[in-house]
Every structure is written in C-alpha cells, then in structure tokens.
Amino acid sequence: MRVLVIEDEPDLLAGIARALRDEGYAVDTAADGEDGLFKAESWPYDLILLDVMLPGRDGWEIVRRLRERGRRVPVLMLTARDAVADRVRGLDSGADDYLTKPFALDELLARVRALIRRGADQPAPVIPLADAVLDLRARVVLRKGRPVPLTPREYALVEYLALHRGCVVSRTDLYDHLFGEDDDTLSNLLDVHVSNIRRKLGHDFIRTRRGHGYCIE
Amino acid sequence: MKVWPRSLRWRLQIWYGALLGAVLAGFAATAFALARESRLRRIDEDLDRRAAALMPAVRAPPRDRPGPPHPAGTPLHEPLPPPIRRPPPSEERGAGVERFRPAPLRVEPLGPPSGLGMEAIEAMLFSGHDRDAAYFVLLSNDGTVVRASASAPALPTNAAPPAADRLIRQRGEFREHVRRLRPGHLLIVGRPIGAELAELRRFGLGLATAATLVWGTAIAVGTRIARRAIQPIEAIAATAARIAGGDLGSRIALHETDSELGSLARVLNETFDRLCEALARQRRFTADASHELRTPLAVILSQAESALARERPAADYREALDACRRAAQRLHHLVESLLTLARLDAGGGGPLNEMVPLDGVAAEALDLLRPLAAERRIEIAADLEPAVCTGRADELAQVALNLVANAIHYNRDGGRIEIATRCDGPNVRLVVKDTGIGMAPEHLPHIFERFYRADPARSRAGGRAGLGLAIAAEVVRRHGGRIDVTSELGRGSEFVVTLPAAAV
C-alpha cells in the first residue's frame, strides 16, 4: 500500500512516515501544498494523509482539487483545529476522515487501515483466501490458525492482491502501490517477492497471468 | 399580597388615571358649586326685592297688640302646597281649614308712605298658588302667624326664633329670607326652589357623566400611548434576553432612531457589537492557541510512540528524542509567550517607574541575538544614542528582543539589520530595520494581532507562534507609546517604537 503524507512540520512528518513504514506501507512525503498536490496527482496512492495548515496550498484546497479531477483516493485530514466548523468544512470539501492533533499513533494507523480497506471496497477486516486467512488488523496471513512468517513487503504484496481478489493486477500497478518514491525498484524485485511468497504459501497461492500480471483467486 | 404592580406601564397608568380623575373631579365640583351659587344668588336677589317691597307695609308701628287673635288661637293658615311633605303641626291640622282668609287685618292702619296697602303688595308680588309662587309669613312675638300670603307653606312650630336680624335659610325645598322687624316680629319671605334644585341636580349629573366620559377616553388613549411608549423597552429587553441566552447575532430593531429610546437602542446595539467582537477575538485566540499547542504535542506523541513501537538502532532513538526536544522547546516558548500576554492583559507585571535606557536595552538584545544573526551571515548596524524612558526594563527588553529576532528571522541570508535609538524632545524612539522579505500592505493592519502571521508556513518553521509582535505592541501600549511599521514586499520592514521620554 502506498501512502502520501503531506505535512509541513518536519518532525511530525518524519514520525508519521517512520510509523507507516514500520507497518509496511510505502510512504511518500511532501512538506508543502504545491509538492503535495503534485505528488497526489502523479501517483495512484492508496491513501493520502493531509495536514490542513500548509504553506502554498492548504489542505482544503488540495482535497477539493483532487476530487474535482475525479480522484477517489481516500484522504485522511490531520489538523490542530478541532472546531466543528473546521471538521465539517474538511469533510465537506471531500475528505474521508478527520483526525485532530495531537493523536495517538495507534488510532492513526487504525484509521489508515480502515480507509484503505474501504477504498478497496473490502469492508470486512478479515479476508478468507484459498487455504489461508488474511487479517488486515494484525497484518498477518494465517494458515491453519498459525501466522505465516512474511516480510512486510511480502505481506503488502499479498494484501494488495487480496484486496483486489479475483482481479489481475499488473506489474506496474504493483510497483506503483508497493514501492515508495525512495525505494529501489529493481526490475526483478517483484519476482523475488512473489517467489518467496509461493515458497511460504504454496505455488498456486499467487497465479501468474503471463503478459498481464498476478492474481489471487 | 402585592397590590402595587411592578410593570412600569401600569404604574404610569395608575398615576395618570388618578391625577386626571382628581383634576376632572375638582373641575366638575367647582363648576357645580359656581352654578349653584349663581342660581341661589338670583333667587336671593328676587326674594330681597320682594321683601323690600313688603317692608314699608309691615313696618308701620302696630298697636301694642297685633289685634285680636285668630279664632281659637288658630294661626293664619294656608293649605299645604302639594310638594310639602312635612305634615303640618297637629293643632293646625285640627283647626278648621279656612282656605283663604282675605285678611282685613290690623294691618290696614299701617298706612304706608308708599300708599300701597298690604293687600296690594300681596296681590302684586305674592299672588298665585302655583308651586313656584313666592310667599310671606309675618310672625308675631310668640310665633303666631300674624299674616301670611296665600301660598305660604306651613311653618315648623318648633322653629326657634333666629338669633340674627337678617337670615337666609333653606328649609327643605324652600328658600326663605327671615327679617326681624321689631323686637319679636319676624317677616319671612320665601319661595319654593324645588325646580331649581332639580335643574341643578340634572346639571351636576350631566357634569359627572361628561367628566367620567372624558376620564374613560383619556385612560383608553393613555393606555395606547403608554403601550406604544413601553413597546421599544420591551423589545430591547427581549433582545437582551436573547443575547444573554446565547443568540449573539441578535440586535434590537431600530424603528424610530430619533427618540431617546432609539438612541438607547443604538448605543446598546453598538455595545453588543463590540462585545461580540471581543468574544469572537477571544474565541479565535483560544482556537489559535490550542492549534499552536497541539502541533508540537503531536510531534512529541508521534515521535515517541513510533520510536517505542519496536527495537531500533541508537541513531533512530537519537533522532526521535531530538524531534521531541525541539517540539518541547517550541511548547516552552509558546507557553512563555502566552503567560506574558496573560500577565500584560491582567495589568502587567508591576509599576512602570524604572528609568530605562532604551539604548542599553537594545544593546543587550543585540548581544543576545548576535550569534543567531551570525549563523545566517546577517550584518548588524547599531546606532544607539542615549534615550531614557520610564517603564519596566524587562518588558521593554522583550520588545527589543522580539523586534530584533523578527528582523533576523524574516531576513535573507547575508542581509542587514539596522538598529537605532533616538531621543527627540518629548519622545524616545527605537528603530529596527531589516532587509528581509517584507510584508504586503494588506497584512500590515493585522500583524500586531495575536497569532497573526503574514505567511503561516514560513514563520512556523522557526518555532514562532505569531505572538512576538502582539506582545511588543501590548507592552508599548502599556507604556503609553506606539509602534509603527512600514514595509515593502521583498525589500524589508521597519519598525519604529515611540515612547514618552523620561522626565529629567
């Protein structure tokens, strides 16, 4: 899952980005409104964390611009303003959720998971797969009740395919959603991850559609 | 039990009604009394005339005896005229009723100089039997009737002889003039006045009716006037109640702006506006303060939580702790500023009676901030003339510090700051000029507002909350001075603090 964090307070941006990366998200960051809007329009993010008070363009304007251009990416707004009018304005301009600073990191991560799930039309937090279960809350794949040891990147790959279960996901899509702007994206990195997952979960867990991409059924 | 109403309107009504009632009653009573008196005076004059005409006839000296008594001692008696209700004395009733005795009494020797006899006068002035006819009665010493006109009513037997020689009296519906002729003789000239009295009663009744009507109308009109007069007060009270209840946008509708109540309403509306504005400012300040406090708190929380989430290399921890320290410093700075403002709002930290050398204060601020300027290769040019004012040194030092810090912060790297103090007559001045980014004219009126920042993003990075200038302005205002700013976008700004010079 690829997340964009737009926040002008550098220490806060760093803290959020580190926490998200710890959870296995690919994280891009932007420190002002212009850069944020540019990135948000350039990449297919699975979620945007957006501060309201930004230099350049403020959060309200960014989310309005995104919605005007038909972007359906879930937007979670972060702000230190907690007046009802501010929250209403944020939600009315197209944000999906609203979190007031200061926030507990656990709550932020839970909201991030919920928004990503809803963005993928997957309302339940548990997705049953062929002979395993994907638990989005604990971020694990369970097989016969026991967690399968996956690296964060491997889990992210399984999660993305599971959220788009039954669909063929192209390699480009996978690169776009699993790797942040700072990640090395060697051309065969994806193949390495896929083969590792197959080793752990069975060869047929991920099917390859030649020339199209990968799929979990 | 409370009888006296609280309502101003009803109190006004009651006073007004009572006063008007008293005036009308007094007026009507006076009119009635005047009418009655004039009517009676006319009657009296008439009776006087008749009596005067009769006098010569009866004044002729009678003999020692007035003559033989009436048969059986019966006084001359006339039948009672119908309106007389009083029963005649019993002995008179018992007497034979001689309706009329053409009395050839002993009066005839009274040859009057006028030549007119009693009969002639009686026939002329006291004839007639109708109710309104005048009458006379001549009484002897012992109260027996010597002579009476035909229409004379019965006299009360027990009537004591009047003490005075002349007397006007009213007996029931008769008006009588009584005159003592010679010792012992009484002449009574009278006439019934029932018709006049009835007329007076009618007049009185009409007067009372008219007065009541006028009173009622006036009360009704007064009620309307009072209601209309009170209405704006009620509207004002209702509006004030709505505002007290939380509807801060409510205002008194101004219908008549010229009246006293109109100007009161206008004053109240202006007061409400100012209160609302102050409240909004306070609310904005609270919102801004909480916003500024929250951001560093969010940094501390998120950094600490994410650092603690798992084992990390030492460098990561150091980085997280560093971020926390920065945020805490920012919080510290912010809380200090807020406390300073709160102290200033509460009246400041103490009396403004120190002699403060403004040049020394500026020099100290420069010394403190010189390293900061050096970091960004900003050149500082100081031209400090001795300038002494009265006030608090620590507060004025804060002003200088804030202005210089701003001049550094908003400067470009390698820029320049000029600081000067001047003493010109009654004022001392502190001038801080920078070659920084400057401000657009639309921001200038607001830069001394709390938390106002011309460019929110730019200034926040330095841990500035937008309170420095607000504090400076507050301190200067408290010292009786002023702070002016000129600025050009992209070229820099100049702040001039003007304070009253210390009295030497």
Image (tube, rainbow, N blue to C red):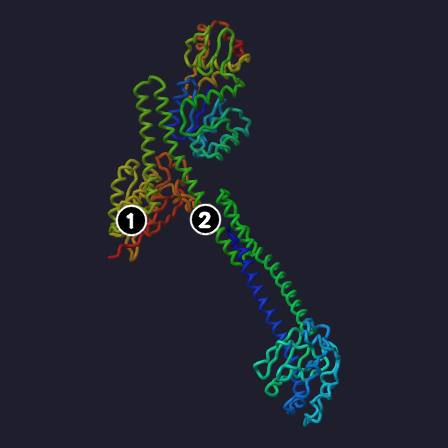
Residue B10's label in the rendered image is: none
- How busy is the neighbourhood of tag 2: few (under 14 within 10 Å), some, or many (20 plus)? few
Viewer-closest of A103 and B299: A103
Quick one: quadrant of the C terminus of chain B?
bottom left
Q: Chain of mark 1?
A: B
Residue B420's label in the rendered image is: 1
- Say which amino acid is labelled 2: Arg
Image height check: is B435 above or below A101?
below
Viewer-closest of B256 and B352: B256
Image height check: is B329 above or below B489?
above
Residue B274's label in the rendered image is: 2
Image height check: is A71 above or below B76?
above
Q: Secondary structure at mark 1?
A: strand
Image coords of residue B242 (percent x, y): 51, 45
Image coords of residue B321 (percent x, y): 31, 25
Q: Chain of mark 2?
A: B
Distance between mark 1 and mark 2 Cα atoms: 38 Å
